[in-house]
Image (spheres, rainbow, N blue to C red):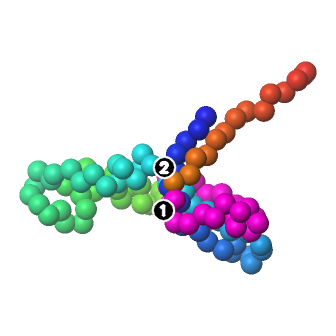
Amino acid sequence: MKKEYVVRSIDAAPDGAPYVIVSLSSVKDLKEGTQNPQSPFGSPKVMGFSNMNDMMKDLNKMLSGMGGGMGMQSGITQLKLEMHEYKEMGLSVGDKVFLELSKAESLGV
């Protein structure tokens, strides 16, 4: 499986170790985030929602995201890269990257 991401942020290791944390957002999530549907209550939107149901959904998403590990935002993929890997790749915020996952074939039982 191969997915396309955009580098959202690059942070130093919280413990000062020689690695960086690269945060990725999927291209699909970024495209959905830039679309602004018209509000039936007129424009501009106040507080970023168009009706009470949307407000409650957004509030639930925000509250459930706070309980997640170390305050990570939902929809963010994070990678831990050693410094030499990071320098070799030359990543910067806004770069498009591909992440490829494959299952290892196991022989025998």
Q: Which residues are magenta?
A: 67-95
| Residue farthest along the right direction in this orientation | 108
Q: Secondary structure at mark 2?
A: strand
Residue 24, x across and y down, in percent:
54, 56
At 84% from the left edge and 27% from the top edge, which residue is drawn?
A: 106
Q: Is residue 67 in view?
A: no
**Quadrant placement of the N terminus:** top right
Which residue was labeled with disc 1? Answer: 94
Residue at mark 1 to residue at mark 2: CA–CA distance: 12 Å
Q: Residues within 10 Å of mark 2 (few under 14, many from 20)?
A: some
Is 90 magenta? The answer is: yes
Task: State which quadrant residue 91 falls in.
Answer: bottom right
Q: Residue at x 16, y 51 (%)?
A: 38
x then y, percent, for residue 35: 27, 51
Q: In this view of the protein, can residue 19 be seen by the observer?
A: yes
**Magenta-drawn stretch contains 87:** yes
Q: Are marks 1 and 2 in contact (CB under 8 Å)?
A: no
In the rendered image, which residue does mark 2 sit on? 26
**Going from the N terminus, do you reach mark 1 or mark 2 first?**
2
Q: Nearer the viewer, residue 22 or 83?
A: 83
The quarter holding residue 3 reads top right
Q: Does residue 39 sit above or below 14 in this rendering?
A: above
Q: Is residue 104 above or below residue 98?
A: above
- Residue at image x 63%, y 64%? 90
Image-based side of 56 in relation to 100, left or right = left
SS class, disc 1: loop
